[in-house]
Image (cartoon, grey):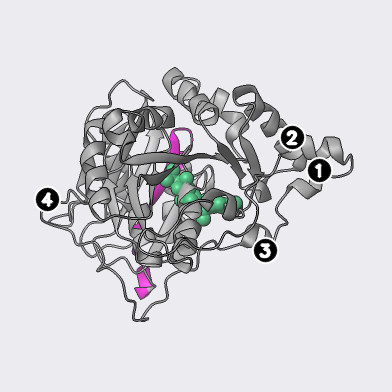
């Protein structure tokens, strides 16, 4: 029996990991055993750590490059590892700059096609920023093409972060999507919350009897069709805002709470993790030169905290603002002054959010940007700690 694969694509910060968290929790609730392959542009697996911490899932990680191009040859080895564990379903979360069509094509190669079946390709869209991509990212033509491919290749498109935009914007986004993809289901969500039944339909436990089917497998039609049927009904296409923009997202880890599940990622060994700074100096880890592929001018830099050093939230937020014209995404685990709990910081678009984290290693932040001067970024970073 072939193992179903669900591929999650979508630009940086659009809500892929948020969706994967709900999917994994739902899988466990249904008695399914998921396998996860997480691809990150940066050298640190921020998202993999979040998934392991919050769900206990074992995550295969492919770091420091894009699985659709520079890391493509490693995809096979990672898939083999996952298949050996005989999961009921495999999730592949791509980087924000990956072309999912490349992965879909790879899965059609006879070797993989006999073992795996592409169950669904889901693309997340950041409602707050998607309409600006054409201008903001125009310097990187390959990337703009890739973002179109993310829409064109999808079976389901989730327009996420609906809480941050007006309904008129959602109309525009739907039109944009329909130019690239006439048939995909479209969902409008907050915190990637969709009914998971359609997506999981047909996925059954391989070790036990199939679970009974739940709701009918139909994706929503999107705002345009709904509005045509119900002229006053644009609102009805939206997932109702539950907690508005103050929603904190997945429950933050509680400190001091005993937690089962895998041990937190350890640094050392062959893991390339952030190099703990020696002699009070921040040592940046630079990603090797970029390749031609699904993007050309996006790069990632992982910057560690010097040993024992902390940063106030306001200082890091102002650092993000300083790099705003180049910075597309930042995330990491940060130590604050005054013995405050370690924080998971997430910066997407112009927004920064903070949550408690139990990350035990050297604090670091991964910066992903367009044409970022990595040496200068590292210098400015070191200056924060002087
Ligand atoms: N306001 C708001 N924030 C959201 C929503 N969905 C996700 N977020 C936040 O946006 C940030 C990015 O979400 P992720 O799920 O990590 O996005 P991603 O696509 O996995 O990001 P990358 O893997 O880095 O490309 C996190 O801080 C989320 O909590 C939403 O609907 N509304």
Residue drawn at x 23%, y 52% as measured from the top left: 84
Q: Is residue 94 visible?
A: no
State the SS at label 1: helix
Residue on which the image places disc 2? 171
**Numbered mark located on residue 270 in the image:** 4
Lower sequence index among marks 4 and 3? 3
**Numbered mark located on residue 224 in the image:** none
**Numbered mark located on residue 243 in the image:** 3
Quadrant of residue 133 in the image?
top right
Relative depth, front residue between 199 and 300: 199
Measured Cα–Cα span from mark 3 to mark 1: 20 Å
Measured Cα–Cα span from mark 4 to mark 3: 43 Å
Q: Report x, y in % for residue 99.
A: 41, 29
Q: Along the horizontal axis of the image, is 305 left or right of 192?
A: left
Q: Report x, y in % for residue 306.
A: 22, 57
Q: Which of label 3 and label 1 is nearer to you? A: 1
Residue on which the image places disc 1? 234
Which segment is the magenta one? 322-339
Measured Cα–Cα span from mark 2 to mark 1: 9 Å
Q: Is residue 166 visible?
A: yes
């Amino acid at each position: 029996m072939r193992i179903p694969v669900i591929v999650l694509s979508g630009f940086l910060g659009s809500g892929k990991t948020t969706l994967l968290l709900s999917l994994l929790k739902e899988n466990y609730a249904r008695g399914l055993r998921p396998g996860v392959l997480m691809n990150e542009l940066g050298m640190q697996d921020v998202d993999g750590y979040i998934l392991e911490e919050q769900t206990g899932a074992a995550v295969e990680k492919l770091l420091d490059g894009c699985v659709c191009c520079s890391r493509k040859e490693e995809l096979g080895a990672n898939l083999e590892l996952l298949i050996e564990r005989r999961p009921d379903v495999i999730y592949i979360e791509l980087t924000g700059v990956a072309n999912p069509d490349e992965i879909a094509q790879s899965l059609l190669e006879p070797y993989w096609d006999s073992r795996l079946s592409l169950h669904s390709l889901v693309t997340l869209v950041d409602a707050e920023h998607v309409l600006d991509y054409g201008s903001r990212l125009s310097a990187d033509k390959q990337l703009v093409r890739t973002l179109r491919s993310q829409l064109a290749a999808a079976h389901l498109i989730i327009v996420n972060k609906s809480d941050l935009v007006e309904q008129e914007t959602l109309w525009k986004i739907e039109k944009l999507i329909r130019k690239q993809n006439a048939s995909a289901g479209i969902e409008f969500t907050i915190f990637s919350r969709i009914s998971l039944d359609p997506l999981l339909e047909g996925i059954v436990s391989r070790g036990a009897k199939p679970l009974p089917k739940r709701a009918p497998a139909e994706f929503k039609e999107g705002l345009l069709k709904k509005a045509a049927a119900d002229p006053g009904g644009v609102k009805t296409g939206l997932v109702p805002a539950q907690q508005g923009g103050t929603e904190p997202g997945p429950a933050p880890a509680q400190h001091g709470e005993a937690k089962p599940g895998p041990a937190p990622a350890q640094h050392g060994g062959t893991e390339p993790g952030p190099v703990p700074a020696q002699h009070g100096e921040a040592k940046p880890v630079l990603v090797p030169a970029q390749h031609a592929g699904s993007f050309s001018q996006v790069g990632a830099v992982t910057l560690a905290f010097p040993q024992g050093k902390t940063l106030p939230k306001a200082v890091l937020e102002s650092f993000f603002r300083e790099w705003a014209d180049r910075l597309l995404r930042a995330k990491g685990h940060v130590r604050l002054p005054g013995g405050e709990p370690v924080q998971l910081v997430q910066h997407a678009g112009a927004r920064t959010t903070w949550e408690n984290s139990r990350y035990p290693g050297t604090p670091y932040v991964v910066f992903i940007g367009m044409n970022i001067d990595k040496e200068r970024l590292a210098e400015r970073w070191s200056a924060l700690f002087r």
